[in-house]
Amino acid sequence: MNVQTKPRYQQLKDRIIEQISSGDLRPHDRVPSENELVESAGVSRMTANRALRELTHEGYVDRVAGIGTFVSDLKANSHLLEVRNIADEVALRGHVHSAYVVRQIRQPAAEEVAWALHISEGSDVFSILLVHCEDGVPIQVEDRYVVTEFAPAFLEQDFTAVTPSAYLSDISPLQEADHVVRAVMPDKDVRGRLKMALQEPCLMVIRRTWAKGKPVTYGRLHHPGSRYELSGHYATPVAPHKPKTEFQRNGVRSL
């Protein structure tokens, strides 16, 4: 989509996202208020409000009532859902990981992909669709798009031997990641690849990773709701780690 044809709120969002990805706005920096955006960008208050509201919903900024809007610390939030190699997850459970590739091509970026990767619609990206299995049972459909300049040899890789996550991390350490987790009903293609029952929901993770200040991959990861779960642990840096009590180990919080 040409920038000039985008809605004004989307243009405003893109401008703020670009400032964040370039480092002009750093984590915890204050973002212009609605009033400031109205004056500096020449937009209506409704447009400014929608831009900030969607940026908040998508995790780019945090709005603090009565104080202001600030750039989110994506690194600090990554504890909620770490970027892990699914092959390592399977191995840690003592099982065998395998994968098969459905699609591994170069193709023009659709609007959604182009927006997520901060590139022009129609620009070439690498696209891969593969199914990950645990002991032969499918547990994830990975639909990923990669900026070509970031991984020029992407199409030459054997992703049945190494996962895309492992390969991309070897090229350059990923600096940041953002995630959206949703419960969805899968389409016929995803349901068939994951061998799911007709009315079984999916756990879908929309993941974007960043390197050198720019988004470099964007993907949708579908998991069968009955065979996959996400979990994590976080302790605040100011509080020393305490052993879990017997109540906590049994899933009951002690007060």
Image (spheres, rainbow, N blue to C red):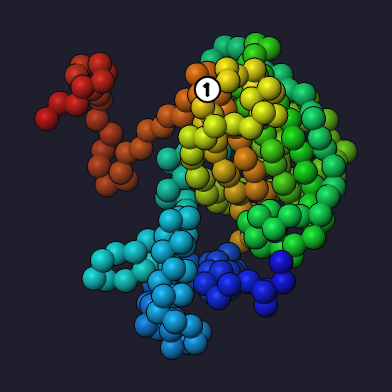
Please state, as top left, top right, bottom left or bottom right, where the N terminus lies in the image. bottom right
Could you tell me residue 221's position as x and y percent?
61, 35
- In the rendered image, the residue lying farthest to the right is 156
In the image, residue 122 sits, relative to residue 247, either above or below, namely below
Left or right relative to 150: residue 197: left
Could you tell me residue 111's position as x and y percent?
69, 58
Residue where numbered disc 1 is placed: 200
What residue sits 65% from the left and 60% below the top? 115
- In the rendered image, the residue lying farthest to the left is 255
Q: Could you say which is closer to the camera, residue 203 or residue 106? A: 203
What residue sits 79% from the left and 60% below the top? 122
Disc 1, SS = loop
In the image, residue 219 sits, relative to residue 149, either above or below, namely above
Left or right relative to 152: residue 221: left
In the image, residue 142 sits, relative to residue 21, either above or below, namely above
Pointer 1 local density, CA inside 10 Å: few below 14, some 14–19, many at least 20? few
What residue sits 51% from the left and 45% below the top? 179
Residue 43 seen by the camera: yes
